[in-house]
Amino acid sequence: MKAVALTRYLPVDDPSSLQDVVLEEPAPGPGDLRVRVEAVSVNPVDTKVRAPKAQVEPAPKVLGYDAAGVVDAVGSDVEGFAVGDAVYYAGDITRPGSNAQFQLVDARIAARKPASLDFAAAAALPLTAITAWELLFERMPFVFDGGGAGKSLLVIAGADGVGSITIQLAKLAGFTVIATASREDTVAWCKSMGADHVIDHRHALAPQLEALGFPSIDAAVNFADTDRYWQVLGELLAPQGHVGLIVEPAGALAIGDPYKAKCIGIHWELMFTRSRFRTPDMAEQGRILARVASLVDAGRLRSTQTQTLSPINAENLREAHRRLESGRTIGKLTLSGW
């Protein structure tokens, strides 16, 4: 099968950073689906894993997490899926990735793709949708059905992949959503996702929030720079508020006042936790994706896909990584076809 892989961790402009290779098709284990990959998307985790370091892989390592495709084979213990099913999933960081024509994925973390979306639009959703859903409705103490009613949510980096789907899910849950963005196109994108207000992260947030009638906020999710916004969010959050984080801090965080004084809940999210540690509730990710697919097909959620490159090969994946590393992408960038 065709695949894109690395053996050395290099800057994206180095042609050897990602290379076209030919590998053996994998055989499914008892709980696996083997998926013929039709489309993938890129996420910051892809570029972080590929980032330069001295390590050398003894065999080609395939990256990639988001994917949509067609079930080609099923393991002996799999229930609920059959050959020919169109599926989507975010994968497992401990296993070979989606940048290959065929991939094995644990059936518990996959779901049938939204019927109303093509493969590329579907591939834009899994990792970010799971991240947003787990953070808002499992890590933080809110529920999807009306749990945000009467509450305000600040979304730092509203125009990126996870910010885009978070805005949509939070609006469906009833939150008043305030997103941060700075360019005309990113402001427009946040509003198109459903944000009630958009404020400029290049300027102090508190005066902008106060001008909108929010002297404090009930909850915040930070998808950008944990260190930069740590003190700021501690001051903005109301007593007994909540903050959700996905980016590891560069240094140790001082968890004192105002966090202690206000009893602010601090919630970490990593969507690979369930698959990495094989948690007893691992199948919850498949259920989240099924719920997301139903919301998409009902017209309540939309794909966050904004760009598509074709075909899936090393040259286009390097370009996708390059665009993502520029910090100027909006929504999700996908790749389609071999």
Image: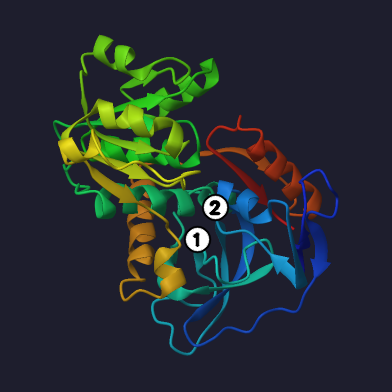
Q: From this view, report whether residue 235 is shown above or below residue 281.
A: above
* The disc label shown at residue 34, or none: none
Secondary structure beneath label 1: strand
Q: Residues within 10 Å of mark 1 (few under 14, many from 20)?
A: many
Q: Are marks 1 and 2 in contact (CB under 8 Å)?
A: yes
Query: What kind of residue is marked 1?
Result: Tyr
Q: Give residue 123's mark.
A: 2
Question: Could you tell me how far apart the alpha carbons at marks 1 and 2 are, in whole angstroms?
Answer: 6 Å
Residue placed at 67% from the left, 61% from the top?
A: 99
**In the rendered image, which residue does mark 1 sit on?**
88
- Lateral position of residue 114 relative to residue 97, left or right: left
Q: Position of residue 277 (x, y in %)?
A: 42, 73
In this view, the residue in front, 20 or 216, is 216
Res 107 quadrant in image: bottom left
Q: Quadrant of residue 262?
A: top left
Colouring convention used in this rendered image of the protein: rainbow
* Badge 2: residue crowd in 10 Å (few <14, some 14–19, many ≥20): many
Question: Who comes first in sequence, dot 1 or dot 2?
Answer: 1
Q: Nearer the viewer, residue 178 or 292?
A: 178
Q: Position of residue 236 (x, y in %)?
A: 26, 26
- Which residue is depicted at the point 39% across and 58% down? 289
- Residue 225 place in picture, x, y as percent: 47, 36
Which of the image's four quarters has the N terminus?
Answer: bottom right
Disc 2, SS: helix
Residue 318 appears left or right of 261 = right
Q: Residue furthest top?
A: 211
Q: Quadrant of the C terminus?
A: bottom right
Locate residue 325, reporting x and y percent. 65, 38
Residue 50 seen in this snapshot: yes
| 166 vs 297: above or below | above
In the rendered image, the vertical position of residue 114 relative to residue 103, given as above or below = above
